[in-house]
Image (cartoon, rainbow, N blue to C red):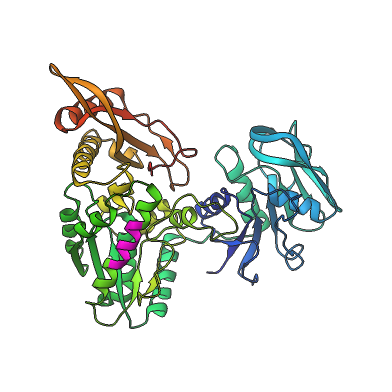
Amino acid sequence: MNEKILILDFGSQFTQLIGRRLREMNVFCEIHPYHHYPKPDASVKGIILSGSPYSVMDENAPDIDLAHIRGHIPLLGICFGSQYLARRYGGSVHSSLSREYGRATLEITEPVSPLFKDIPSPTTVWMSHGDSIESLPVNSINLASTSDVKYAAFRFLNEDTYAVQFHPEVYHSVHGKEILRNFAFNICKCKGDWTPSCFIESTVNELRAKVGKEQVILALSGGVDSTVAAVLLHKAIGKQLHCIFVDNGLLRLNEYQSVMKSYEEMGLNITGVDASGVFLSALKGISDPESKRKAIGRTFIEVFHKESGKIQDATWLAQGTIYPDVIESVPVHGHSAVIKSHHNVGGLPDHVPLKIVEPLRMLFKDEVRRIGVSLGINKDLIGRHPFPGPGLAIRLLGEITPEKLAILRHADDIFIRNLKKDNLYDKVWQAGAILLPVKSVGVMGDERTYEYTIALRAVESTDGMTADWVHLPYDFLMKVSNEIINKVKGINRVVYDISSKPPATIEWE
């Protein structure tokens, strides 16, 4: 990689959005914990300090030595990063009377600053902090203010070190992307030459160097991520790749058969394994969502351990893990909070003699799709909605039973089929049905019923980190509801989920 920007993470849930915005500009970036990052070399064009859930005034607040960075490499502090720069270099920070959260009007006092080039004043920005800068650090000037925050942005004189109290990376900062663009191109002098083709070329070379002549097993799921991972690996190592598709008993209606057919037509070396009974036995009696995920993960590993023994000299297990999986599973970057565990994240136990290769680990979902298009993968496969690794197990709340799975499969199939029939499928980022552990009274014909409820979920998103519910037409929802209630035995009520992420997740468990 010829150039990049390093993002030093202090634990903010917004850190990944900074990376996304830069990558949208074709600027490659890497996110590292503030206390463990590579020594900047000539390829590093700039460094960004992220926000944080911590206060700079906390006794155990994150601390970092910037002696080899400040004044040598362009530097941008965001929220906590700006407060840290202020307090560390002679300014002062105080606790606000109330948390400053939400939209604010920014007045730019130094419009000639390269950071605010072509940014109108006033402009709307997004605030999310409990502390404010009371006085600027030594040898610095103010660049912008809001009605509540006097020092909303500042810079150090005679060096390319900038700080903003607001979050330019979030959608609500109207010109936030342009501010980050100014930092990347006007201040860091980036070229913006990171493209899907560039990623494919570098990844293929890295895979060849990493794998060598060794054999690789890939866990295919039928989804976009594992498909793109398979094609990348096939491009790099050819027949050394052995694809395995496991039927875990938690797939959608007829999914196992259709997925196997698609991959065979693509020329991939694939073996299908029916392990549905093993998974359902492992899930018997389990209702807790995290326990279900862990049980699926353990079983997945056990199945692959068994299958790997059938492939001579296999030393690698490939997975289609992507960045949101990693972010939500483990605090690998700074102190980011764990949201949920993923069955394909975190490595293998010691008794499984396979090393892990994850070619998509640092990519967001929309980036994976762009890579897939560049690889020439079939549009139908690239356009598939995301489907969780644990499958229907996390869309069936409570204990998993074959009877409940059959109900959920049928309802989900009706929902997805109608989305495609009404040309709504491609307008939705992800959709599915959820079977609730709730029974309610209904009337069908002249009889009283006491049956389950299905919740329909459809969201708009780009990366899965945030999502908004989709305003599906009422007539469409009515049609789907009627069909589910009339055709799916065991359902007498259908509801539509209008929660956004955050605070809700896309999947219910």
Q: Is residue 486 above or below residue 320?
A: above
Q: Nearer the viewer, residue 85 or 1?
A: 85
Percent x, y of residue 93? 80, 45
Position of 156 compared to 311: left or right? right
Residue drawn where x is 74% and y is 53% of the image: 84
Magenta portion: prevailing SS class? helix
Residue 113 appears anywhere in the view: yes
Instruction: Magenta stretch: give its range.
Output: 295-302
Position of 71 compared to 227: left or right? right
Dividing the picture into quadrants, the one containing residue 189 is bottom right
Percent x, y of residue 450? 22, 26
Dividing the picture into quadrants, the one containing residue 454 is top left
Position of 472 compared to 186: left or right? left
Residue located farthest toward the front when viewing the structure as drawn: 285
Q: Is residue 105 above or below residue 232?
A: above
Q: Is residue 155 above or below residue 348?
A: above
Residue 384 appears anywhere in the view: no
Residue drawn where x is 31% and y is 36% of the image: 437
Percent x, y of residue 261? 16, 58
Residue located farthest toward the left when viewing the structure as drawn: 446
Dividing the picture into quadrants, the one containing residue 398 is top left
Magenta residue check for 301 = yes
Position of 506 compared to 77: left or right? left
Q: Nearer the viewer, residue 169 or 493?
A: 493
